[in-house]
Image: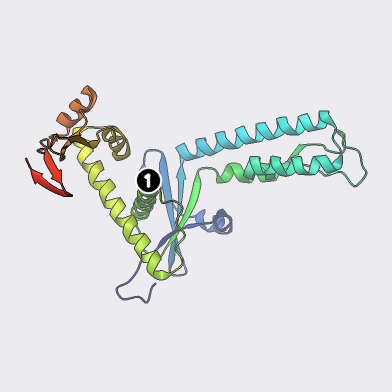
Amino acid sequence: MRAADPPVHDLVGTPKGRLTQREHAFLDQPWHVVRAPVTVELLQQDHEAYVRALSAGRRDKEQAMRQRRLKRLCKRLQALQQQAPSRDQLLPTLGAAKKEAGRAYGLVKIPVPEKDQPVTPDTVALTLHRKQRRLARRREGRYLRRTNLVNDNPAQRWANDIQLTEVEQALKDLKGDLKIRPIFPQSDRRIAAHLFVAFLAYCLQVTSKARLRPLAPGLTPRSALEKFAVIQMVDVHRPTTDGRTLVLRRYTEPEPELHLLLDQLHLRRPEQPPPRISSNRQAHIA
């Protein structure tokens, strides 16, 4: 990408394991406040820049999710201890509990009984993995991005990351509305087409958001589309006495709430089209 002409810039997510590897290098970097609950710091290394962000809102959300999953996991394991199943019955149950708990499963130590060993509270003793728990708490609300855009403005790198998130969300919404998910492009040509459609979806979303912001604050483009989806256009076919068909194309009358939204957005409904008379698959204006 660095040798491309014109140059191509990348901004990609980075596994949290790499965040742990470079954690000591970030200690000497200053934090920059880019928004009230978000702070970022920039580390330039090996012709690349690493942006570490800390979001207080994201930290609270991840902490609540971890505690909820860990609490559910502990209750399930305590119930298993009381049921005293056999070892063959215990292993599939532990596998299901691990899948449900996700990363929270790594925060506890669950010994597995040996073959022909009974399942008792002593053989399946649940203990918290304190080191992993401290590490998880330290990582909550933090994420790392890697980019070849090397400059001294970490706030701009964070803004690019937010823009990337909006592009991905716009494409996700578009694929969901068109019911064409999931998409697995297998060639460079299809990947380029996928990115082009994502860019168009992002442009539509940004344009709609910019139009809604001053006229209808608080209304998102997706919610606006959902409100306008109730307005439909239908064709009413009425046969005539001479064997022809009268076609009336009409759209449904919007509810009073939509009338207010249309007025707020300075939009006018089009005039109802004139009726048509079809005969032998040909339409004529009445």
Residue drawn at the location 47% of the way across and 69% of the way down: 46
Which residue occupies the foreground of this view, 267 or 137?
267
Residue drawn at the location 30% of the way across and 51% of the way down: 202
Q: Is residue 203 above or below residue 69?
A: below
Which residue occupies the foreground of this view, 152 or 16?
16
Q: Is residue 183 above or below residue 119?
A: below
Residue drawn at the location 17% of the way across and 31% of the way down: 262
Is residue 109 something one can see in this rendering? no
> How is the protein colored in the picture?
rainbow
Circle 1 packing at 10 Å, graded few (<14), some (14-19), many (20+), is: some
Q: Amino acid at mark 1?
A: Asp
The spot of residue 277 in percent (x, y) is 12, 41
The spot of residue 100 in percent (x, y) is 64, 40
Residue 80: name its quadrant: top right
**Disc 1 target residue:** 173
The spot of residue 255 in percent (x, y) is 23, 24
